[in-house]
Image (cartoon, grey):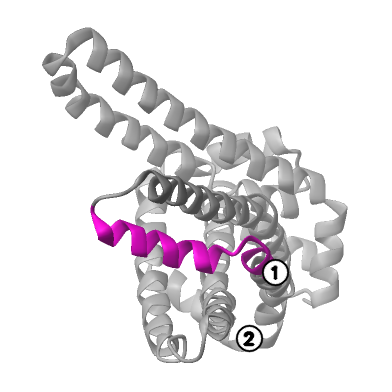
């Protein structure tokens, strides 16, 4: 694990310009799009109104209407931008980073143009994998919600006690499924597989090593969360100055900087871990050496 993380940060440092450019080219348009949407929908005013109404405690009929409108506006905008990030921006950035890191790993020239040309050729499988992962998450949410309703209505307090056992099982299944599918994006980009085949390929590579892969990724999440919190805390000093519009711009800028600087670390670790699993299962390093002779 230590060697893997050291390799990831070394690769990040040595290819910093390329890595930041690959991430920035999708994150900057998203930040600009988010700012425009925030301005058009008045989400800043809605958020302020929501805080003001929530502090009152009691509401008139008009205030309740204002409260519902503010909540709908905030949730709608946040959910919409979140879906764009999850289903479009994140998969494209992951795919481009996968190609660039893969080229670096096998000692091939890694360039910004080559990374995004490769994404262009594989864009539909890339987006399809993201959609399948999202639909699986929705399925787990529906399953959990359905169990809550059914057991609550049918068994009452006994159903609530049963949920104490069932919910951890569902969480365990979610962890297993998403850990097993961690290498779907590398499989699409580096092995040119279709979305279903990529999910199967990832499942095969992780099989038998699920606790190890999950443990490494959990550690990476903790590390990147700490780094994000540190960078965010340093930038938060700037986001409280100026009027509402200036604060919105600064907040978006701070979020953009955190995404560009920290997000690539996770992508790099996933690709290096993908190659690590291929080496362990398929002696990929020997194949690569033979191909270069």
**Residue 196 colored magenta?**
no
Return the x and y of residue 164 as percentages of the image width and height: 18, 28
Left or right, residue 13 beside residue 108: left
Task: Identify the residue under disc 2.
Answer: 16
Q: Is residue 293 visible?
A: no
Few, some or many C-alpha atoms within 10 Å of disc 2 (few <14, some 14-19, many ≥20)? some
Q: Secondary structure at mark 1?
A: helix
Left or right of residue 163: residue 28:
right
Judge the density around disc 1: few (<14), some (14-19), many (≥20) Cα neighbours within 10 Å.
few
* Residue at x 43% of width, y 63% of height: 49
Place of residue 75 in the rendered image (x, y in percent of width and height, measured from the top left): 50, 50
Residue at x-position 66% and y-position 54%: 84
**Residue 258 visible (yes or no):** yes
Judge by depth and name the residue closer to the eye, 104 or 219. Answer: 219
Which quarter of the picture shows residue 221?
bottom left
Magenta region: 36-57
């Amino acid at each position: 694990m230590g060697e893997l993380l050291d390799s990831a940060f070394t690769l990040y440092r040595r290819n910093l310009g390329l890595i930041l450019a690959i991430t920035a080219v999708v994150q900057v348009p998203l930040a600009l799009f988010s700012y425009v949407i925030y301005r058009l929908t008045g989400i800043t005013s809605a958020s302020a109104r929501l805080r003001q109404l929530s502090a009152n405690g009691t509401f008139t009929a008009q205030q309740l209407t204002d409260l519902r409108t503010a909540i709908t506006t905030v949730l709608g905008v946040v959910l919409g931008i979140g879906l764009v990030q999850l289903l479009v921006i994140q998969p494209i950035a992951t795919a481009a980073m996968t190609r660039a890191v893969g080229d670096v790993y096998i000692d091939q020239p890694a360039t910004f143009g080559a990374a995004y040309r490769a994404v262009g050729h594989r864009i539909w499988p890339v987006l399809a994998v993201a959609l399948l992962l999202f639909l699986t998450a929705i399925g787990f949410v529906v399953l959990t919600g359905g169990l809550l309703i059914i057991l609550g209505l049918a068994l009452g307090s006994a159903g609530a006690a049963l949920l104490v056992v069932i919910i951890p099982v569902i969480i365990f299944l979610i962890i297993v499924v998403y850990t097993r599918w961690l290498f779907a994006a590398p499989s699409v980009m580096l092995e040119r597989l279709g979305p279903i085949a990529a999910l199967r390929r990832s499942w095969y590579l992780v099989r038998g090593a699920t606790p190890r892969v999950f443990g490494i990724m959990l550690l990476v999440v903790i590390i990147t969360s700490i780094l994000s919190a540190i960078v965010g805390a340093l930038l938060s000093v700037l986001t409280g100055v100026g009027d509402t519009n200036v604060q919105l711009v600064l907040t978006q800028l701070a979020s953009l900087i955190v995404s560009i600087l920290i997000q690539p670390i996770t992508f790099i670790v996933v690709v290096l871990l993908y190659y690590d699993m291929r080496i362990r299962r398929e002696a990929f390093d020997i194949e690569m050496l033979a191909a270069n002779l």
